[in-house]
Amino acid sequence: MKTVVRLMLPLAVMLIQLGFTAGLASAAVTGDCVNCHTMHNSQNGQAVADHNGTTLTSAQVNLLNSDCLGCHTDATQTIAMIGTGNQSRVPIVLTTSEPTYPPNGSSNSVLAAGNFYWVAQGDDTKGHNVFGLRGNTFAANVDSNLSAAPGNAQPTGSGSVCRNCHGTLATEISGCKGCHFAAHHVDDGPGNVVTGQGDGWYRFLSGAQMLAAVNPGGSSRDALLAQAGVVGVEDANWEQDPTSHNTYKGATGFTSAGFGSVNGNSIGLYCTGCHSRFHHSMGGADDGLQNASGAWIRHPSDVVLPGAGTEYANYNYTALAPVAYETIDSTGAGTTALVTCISCHRPHGSPYPDMLRWDYSGCVANAVNTECGCFACHTSKDGVVP
């Protein structure tokens, strides 16, 4: 049975889903409160809040000991044990030495969303440029190749409030919380589908953060909190060993011109907040997936993987090129597979350009290559007869 881990802690531990073994009941949060929280942000006259040993200039909200990357960074391992007696399990999204890729179950294998290591080393093509990776200023983290998120339909002017979240993740107002929003601890036990605000949404992926910054307590923010988030089932070890995996909800809806949709609670539609032009309907518009003649001009996303009678019918789920499902249950089983953004990309980062899951330059038609994710779906193109 797949295990869903739920925890709602703001900012510093927004990605922490702690202490589960698949199939066994366990508390979602384990260990001493002091592992994550400080009551006064001082000890022996010194400030407590720090980022990997460097004292932060201001206290962190919600009595946290550190910021996001301070908690989710490690030298080598991608699941860290912290606190007295190593009570708490923390998923690591940034290692300071190169992690194992693709993941093979070793202690330094990248987790499901990848690793920020490569973009933190200075290659802006290999991950999202998140505030804090290379210093706590916008200038240090801004992408050297892109002026805005690819496929972005939001205003891009320097004075645009929308741009702070939708145009870049390099600002303090966006950063990790541009994608992840967390508010409180939740423990519903293992083997459940994370379905809503009360669950903390799947992996804390909620669209509410963008409004929380500009309209705290506003009715529109509250409405968004209740509906705009991702549904899924999480692997107990965050895919460090890819033989077990997360399960993501998909949806076939598309956005209209301009802003992205919050409907469907799917991982693909969630990405429309910044990349909406990659999710338009098939046909008609110049920025759609197909042109007026029906020819593909962009790889389809949020589209059902064709079944019987096609090469795609031979697809078998793989963490190399995962699909999402229109419906999922607590075991992680799903029905109606859909191609989605993360079928090809790891949002934190990978060693390949455009944070692809595999080396696209090594994908050669009619040549066997088990590390080419294209052939996971396009099963007749790899030189192996299905």
Image (cartoon, grey):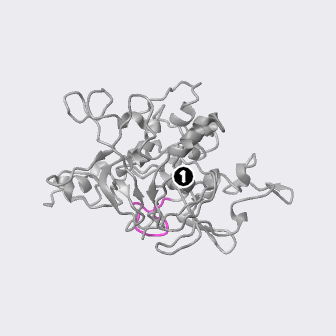
- In the rendered image, residue 218, in percent from the top left (x then y), is placed at 64, 35
Observer-nearest of 294 and 54:
294
- In the rendered image, residue 103, in percent from the top left (x then y), is placed at 41, 63
Tell me: residue 244, above or below residue 163. Answer: below
- In the rendered image, residue 63, in percent from the top left (x then y), is placed at 74, 54
Tell me: residue 111, above or below residue 83. Answer: above
- In the rendered image, residue 228, in percent from the top left (x then y), is placed at 50, 44
Question: Which residue matches tag 1?
Answer: 204
Q: Is 20 on the left-hand or right-hand side of 85?
A: left
- Residue that lies at the very extreme toward the right in this rendered image: 45
Q: Is mark 1 on a helix, strand or loop?
A: helix
> Which residues are drawn in magenta?
98-110
Which image quarter holds the C terminus?
bottom left
Please name the residue shown 50% across and 75% down the image: 24
Please name the residue shown 59% across and 54% down the image: 14
Q: Is residue 381 visible?
A: no
Q: Main secondary structure of the magenta part?
A: loop
Does residue 258 belong to the magenta stretch? no
Please name the residue shown 50% across and 73% down the image: 21
Residue 152 occupies which quadrant of the picture?
A: top left
Tell me: residue 308, above or below residue 279. Answer: below
Q: Is residue 270 visible?
A: yes
Observer-nearest of 113 and 265:
265
Residue 329 occupies which quadrant of the picture?
A: bottom left
Question: Which residue type does callout 1 highlight?
Answer: Phe
Q: Residues within 10 Å of mark 1 (few under 14, many from 20)?
A: many
Does residue 105 belong to the magenta stretch? yes
Q: Is 377 on the left-hand or right-hand side of 276?
A: left
